[in-house]
Image: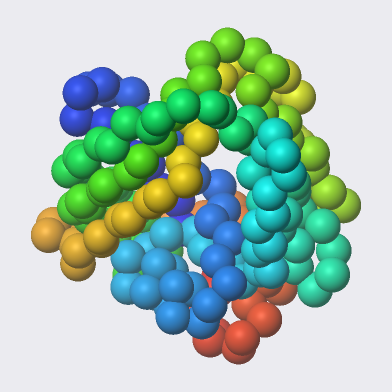
Amino acid sequence: MASITEADQLAGSGSYIVHIAVDSAQALWVGRDVLGFPKVMADVQYSDSATERIAEVSQDGTPISTLAVERPDGPHETLRRDFHCYSVSPVDNAMYHVPYQLEVTATTLPGPGHARLVLGSHPVADELRELGISAQSVGAIFVPQYALVSNLPDKVVPLPEWTEWRSAYRTELDPIGTGSAGS
């Protein structure tokens, strides 16, 4: 299930979502089976130090990644934005247009050194490593509050037959037995 996000104010730019780690069966089902996003069940632990907010992601005890973002001093900006994502589902062989509403309190930290990412020993970490992600951040966003509302797809575009390259290994990452991974 490939996904592309496009910011309205940055026409033509976007992001390719390789995986989204979630820690509840409901988030997995809605994201993967209803909206077509590449979600995998994982253990996600958050912690705070005096200077950082840290997110550690693992699956079956094997580390996937650790992301630490600097905790800035001072007030944060609250933003509200409507946007949309396109997700491609090999289950339905269709592309979905999914509208979202986002409200976030955040501080942008431009420049290097405000975040660090450590990839673990899990196959998902190996896949991310193959993308050539730099160990040096170009900036960071500290987000102490986040609310996202996703709606059902408002457009569905049928696609010609295709094979999504992660399908075989997604079957191995279906720990709750939904049977939809890699289908």
Give above or below for 169 relative to 134.
Answer: below
Q: How is the image coloured?
A: rainbow
Q: Hey, which residue is sitting farthest top in the picture?
A: 111
Give above or below for 126 relative to 182.
Answer: above
Quadrant assignment, res 67: top right
Looking at the picture, how far across and down is residue 167, in whole percent? Answer: 58, 63
From the viewer's side, name the closer residue of 119 and 164: 119
Quadrant assignment, res 162: bottom left
Q: Is residue 50 visible?
A: yes
Q: Hey, which residue is sitting farthest bottom in the picture?
A: 177
Horizontal placement of 112 versus 96: left or right? right
Q: Hey, which residue is sitting farthest left in the picture?
A: 154
Numbered circles on residues, count: 0
Looking at the picture, how far across and down is residue 139, in whole percent? Answer: 56, 20
Horizontal placement of 110 versus 76: left or right? right
Looking at the picture, how far across and down is residue 23, in whole percent? Answer: 58, 72
From the viewer's side, name the closer residue of 80 and 17: 80
Residue in view at x 20 percent, y 40 percent? 81
Residue in view at x 48 percent, y 73 percent? 28
Looking at the picture, how far across and down is residue 5, in whole percent? Answer: 34, 40
Q: Is residue 161 visible?
A: no
Residue in view at x 58 percent, y 60 percent? 21
Residue in view at x 59 percent, y 16 percent? 138
From the viewer's side, name the closer residue of 151 and 140: 140
Horizontal placement of 134 versus 139: left or right? right
Horizontal placement of 74 versus 66: left or right? left
Give above or below for 47 relative to 52.
Answer: below
